[in-house]
Image (tube, rainbow, N blue to C red):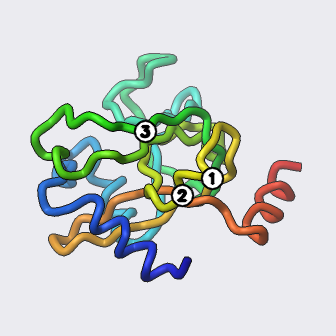
Amino acid sequence: MSDSVERADVREKLGPRFAKPDPGDPVTAPHYEALREHRILIQKCADCGLKRWLPTPVCRRCWSMNSLWTEISRDGVVHSWTRIHQAFWPATRDEVPYQVAIVEMLEGVRLLGTIPMSFRDQLETGLEVRAQFLDMTDGLTLLYFTPSTDTERLALREKKD
């Protein structure tokens, strides 16, 4: 599947009523600014080194309020996933079914993201995936995941070794 077809599929599934995050929130703003540049930033505690997602003002391990932003790779493995068939929010009524996965990134932190329904037959725990970026029309960029290509899988395995 070509990248442009895939992105069109994701845009179509998200639709105009999709509940979007607030990129202006001071705690998460650096993450959303990086997504616009097609990079992924997560927080790292400046005192104990814990990498964390979701961003928070306080480290859950050492309670430090000192944090840094660090870039991570786009590669990960599906840790868990679900397919949503019921609209729990009015904004997603026309979007069901859709798939959500917890992805363990190469650096060990877990991110939450969608996986387009066009990959429903491939989705399973342990699937190697790569983060993709969806540039919305309002300046917001969202993260989603697709199965890694053979070349990306080989590179991921080499990084792990």
For label 3, the SS is strand
- Which residue occupies 43% across, 47% down? 113
State the residue position of label 1: 122
State the residue position of label 2: 119
Looking at numbered disc 1 in the image, what kind of residue is underneath it?
Answer: Gln
Indicate the position of residue 18 as horizontal and vertical percent values: 18, 53
Name the quadrant of the N terminus: bottom right
In the rendered structure, the answer to whether residue 95 lies left or right of residue 1 reads: left
Given residues 102 and 119, the one toward you in this image is 119
Q: Earlier in the sequence, mark 1 or mark 3?
A: 3
**10 Å neighbourhood of mark 1: few (<14), some, or many (≥20)?**
few
Indicate the position of residue 149 as horizontal and vertical percent values: 70, 68
Instruction: Relative to 142, say whether 76 is above or below.
Output: above
Indicate the position of residue 77 as horizontal and vertical percent values: 65, 45
Instruction: Relative to 161, say whether 45 is above or below.
Output: above
In the rendered structure, the answer to whether residue 122 lies left or right of residue 46 reads: right
Given residues 55 and 156, the one toward you in this image is 156
Quadrant hosting residue 55: top left
Whether the residues at callouts 2 and 1 have beta carbons within 8 Å, the answer is yes
Looking at numbered disc 3 in the image, what kind of residue is underneath it?
Answer: Arg
Quadrant hosting residue 65: top left
State the residue position of label 3: 83
Given residues 93 and 74, the one toward you in this image is 93
**10 Å neighbourhood of mark 2: few (<14), some, or many (≥20)?**
few
Looking at numbered disc 2 in the image, what kind of residue is underneath it?
Answer: Phe
